[in-house]
Image (cartoon, grey):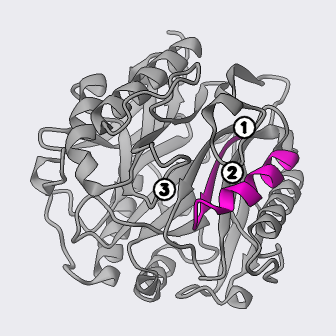
Amino acid sequence: MTEKQLVFQQDFTPLRLPGSEGVVVAQCTRAGNFVWITGQTGHTFDGMLVGAGDAGAQARQACDNLKALMEMAGGSLGDIVRVVTHVTDRGFRDAVYPVMREYFGEPVPCGTGLVVEGLAREEMLVEIDAWAFIDDEDTQKSLVRSKHLGPTRMTGTAGMAAQVYRAGNHVYIQGQTAYTLDGALVGVGDPAAQARQACENIEALMEAAGGSLGDLVRVVTYVTDSAHRLAAYPVIESYLGDPLPCGTGLVVPGLAREELLVEIDAWGFIDDDRVSKTVVRTQDLAPLAMPGSTGRAVQCCRAGNHVYIQGQTAFTLDGELIGIGDAAAQARQACENIKALIEMAGGGLGDVVRIIVYVTDRAHRMAVYPMIRQYFDALWPCGTGIVVKGLAREELLVEIDAWGFIDDPS
C-alpha cells in the first residue's frame, strides 16, 4: 500500500507573505519513494527571514531547510533529483550557485535556473524548488547522464551536473536550452533554433533513459519575451506531437545567460508491464488564441498513482476566457479546473501534493491566495509562489500548476 504522509507543516502567517495570513502549508510530503517539498527561501522554520540583501545567505538557509526536510522524510540531499532555482537578479547567481554546490556536491541534481520578476516578498532574493526520490530495496534511482558545466560559462556554475535521472518509471530531466548536450551554444538570437536544440536534447535524454518523447507527461516552457512563442511553440509541437503533454508556458525576465531565449523543463513516465500512463482529458488549443499554440494538448494524465495536470488559468476546460482584469476570478476558475481534472483522474483536491502559483504582479497575491485557500482549506499543499513577466496571453494574470498523488485503495 502506498499512501501520502505529511512530514512537516508550517503556519506561514509569521512570514508576512501577501495574501497568506492564516495559511498552514505542507512543507514536506512523502508517498512511497517520492518526496515533495515547498519552495525553500531565506525563511527559517520559525518564520524569520535571514540574510537581508544577501542572496548567498538566503541560499544557505534554503539549503539548510532542504537538508532538514529531507532528513525528516527519511532521506538526504543526495536523494534530490531535480531543482529549480529562482533568483530575482541574474547577478545573484554568483553568490547562490556556489552555496548550492557546497550542499549538493557533484553532480548537482538536474536543474533549471530562472531569473524571475519577484518572489512572495520584495526582500526575498532566491527560492529553490526540489523533487526527490528515496531508494528502497526494490527501486533505486540511476544517474543516466551528467555533464561538466564549465563550457557553458553560466554565471556561478561549475563542476558536474546531472542531465537525466531515472527513478523507477519516472524520468527527471535537466532544463534544456540552446546548449547541445556537450555544451556548445547554438541559435544565438534565434528562438526557433534554440527550441529545436532543446527538443533534440530532450529526445536524446529520454532515449538514454529507455523511453521516447511519447513518454513525456509534463513540460514547462520558459521564454524571455512573449514574442518568442510564435517562433518556439510550432517547433516544440513538431517534436512533442499531438496531443502535447500537459504543459505550462511562462515569460520570465531571463535565463542563466543573456543569450538564452528558451528553456524547457520535462518530466517523463515510461510504462512497464505493471503500470501505464493514461490520458484523462485533452483540449483543442486553437480557441485559446495563445501565440504559437495549435493542435491538442493533454489537460490531465494519470500515471500509476501520479496525476499530471496542465497549468490552469482563467480559461474554462472548454476554452472560454473569464475574469478579465479580475485576479480572484481567474484563480477561482483555475482551482475549479484543477478540482474537476483530478476528480476525472479518480482523486480529489486532497490528493494534490504540489502547486506552483504564478502571478504577473505581486499585488495580485492579495486577491489570489485567499481564493486558493478556499479550495485547500486547512492545509495548503507543498507550494511555491512566483511573480513572472507574463503568461501565454496578456489577459492572463494567474496560472496554477498542480501535481497529484492518489493513494492506493485501502
225 to 279, vertically: above or below: below
Residue 89 picture quarter: bottom left
Q: Which residue position is annotated with label 2? A: 266
15 to 354, vertically: above or below: below
Q: Which residue position is annotated with label 3? A: 130
- Contact (CB < 8 A) between labels 1 and 2? yes
- Contact (CB < 8 A) between labels 3 and 2? no
Give the distance between the C-alpha atoms of the residues marked 1 and 2, in whole angstroms: 9 Å
Q: Position of residue 338 (x, y in %)?
A: 47, 25
Q: Amino acid at mark 2?
A: Ala
Query: SS for tag 2?
Result: strand
Q: Amino acid at mark 1?
A: Pro
299 to 132, vertically: above or below: above
Residue sitting at x 51%, y 64%:
252
Give the distance between the C-alpha atoms of the residues marked 1 and 3, in whole angstroms: 21 Å
Q: Earlier in the sequence, mark 1 or mark 2?
A: 1
Q: From which residue to which does the magenta span run?
A: 217-239
Residue 295 can be seen, yes or no: yes
Q: Amino acid at mark 3?
A: Ala
Query: SS for tag 1?
Result: loop
Mark whose residue sits in front, 1 or 2: 1
